[in-house]
Image: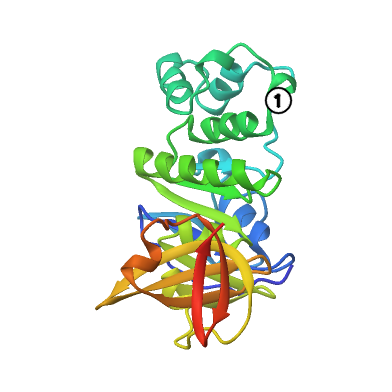
């Protein structure tokens, strides 16, 4: 994978690395974690240099303050939930492991092994294990891609909650625009190993034009108040962004995350919750 990237992520933010398959998203995370060595470049976290090709610095993964949650979760099948989490830390801090179990609503599953857990429960265990050694940077490689829509939406909320609790920097890989709009403070768009856009999701993806004549279903990604009207951002099933102008009465029962139908009636765009 050829990567040519220069990027700064503000400490404490939740940033999403967005792009199609093969864009270099996972490779970027592996480089940051020290699992893949780049040909050249510099990687810094705060005042600490993790990699510098010219100075011969390459800090090993275990010495980088990183928690890595893999796409397939990579839980140890021979360990219980609690043992998996303890392994992610120093193996001794049961009090902190217990607090993670409680925060992620896993206490009742502490003695179970992964084979007896649902997909959503495995996701939470993997997230807890990644947080077990209190990392400065949390790397999440498409953690929700294998889940159904309802579970994915619920766990997006849990990821946002965990990010606020632990107070570090989170980099989440995704190719789902709904996920970007719901979670990201900052989005880094990758294509063919290069950054094509970087910034606030609404600024990066928004188009100033209002939607033309069509009918589509999608999910509400954002509702922004502008003077006497609201701009409702809807992401359709094929990752197309649609913007609808709506009055307060039109969106009285509408919230971010709702499934909606957008259509044209009498030359006016109409948005309807479904």
- Given residues 247 and 116, the one toward you in this image is 247
Left or right for 94, reference 265: left
What percent of the width, then of the height, locates residue 256?
44, 57
Residue depicted at 54% across the width and 21% down the height: 86
Whether residue 65 appears in this view of the structure is: no
Colour option used: rainbow
Left or right for 4, reference 98: right
Please, is residue 44 above or below residue 239 in the view?
above
What percent of the width, then of the height, locates residue 252?
36, 60
What percent of the width, then of the height, locates residue 130?
54, 36
Furthest-front residue in this view: 266
Q: Quadrant of the C terminus?
A: bottom right
> Badge 1 is on which residue?
76
Q: Quadrant of the N terminus?
A: bottom right
Residue depicted at 68% across the width and 65% down the height: 24
Residue depicted at 70% across the width and 23% down the height: 114
Residue depicted at 68% across the width and 28% down the height: 118
Badge 1: few (under 14), some or many (20 or more) residues near its Cα, within 10 Å?
A: some
């Amino acid at each position: 994978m050829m990567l040519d990237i220069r990027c700064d992520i503000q400490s404490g933010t939740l940033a999403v690395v967005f792009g199609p398959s093969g864009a270099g998203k996972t490779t970027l995370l592996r480089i940051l974690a020290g699992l893949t060595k780049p040909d050249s470049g510099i990687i810094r976290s705060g005042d600490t240099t993790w990699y510098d090709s010219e100075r011969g610095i390459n800090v090993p993964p275990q010495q980088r303050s990183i928690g890595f949650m893999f796409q397939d979760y990579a839980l140890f099948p021979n360990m219980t939930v609690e043992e998996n989490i303890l392994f992610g830390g120093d193996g001794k801090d049961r009090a902190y492991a217990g607090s993670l179990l409680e925060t992620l609503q896993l206490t009742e599953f502490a003695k179970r092994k992964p084979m007896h857990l649902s997909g959503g429960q495995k996701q939470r265990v993997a997230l807890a294990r990644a947080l077990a050694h209190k990392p400065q940077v949390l790397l999440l490689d498409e953690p929700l891609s294998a889940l159904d829509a309802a579970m994915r939406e619920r766990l997006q909320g849990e990821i946002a909650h965990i990010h606020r609790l632990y107070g570090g920097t989170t980099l989440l890989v995704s190719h789902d625009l709904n996920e970007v709009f719901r979670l990201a403070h900052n989005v880094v768009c990758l294509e063919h190993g290069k950054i094509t856009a970087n910034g606030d999701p609404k600024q990066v993806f928004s188009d100033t034009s209002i939607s033309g004549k069509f009918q589509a279903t999608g999910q509400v990604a954002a509702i922004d108040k502008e003077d006497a009207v609201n701009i409702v951002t809807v992401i359709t099933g094929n990752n197309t962004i649609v913007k609808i102008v709506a009055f307060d009465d039109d969106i009285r029962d509408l919230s971010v995350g709702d499934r909606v139908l957008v259509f044209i009636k009498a030359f006016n765009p109409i948005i309807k919750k479904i």
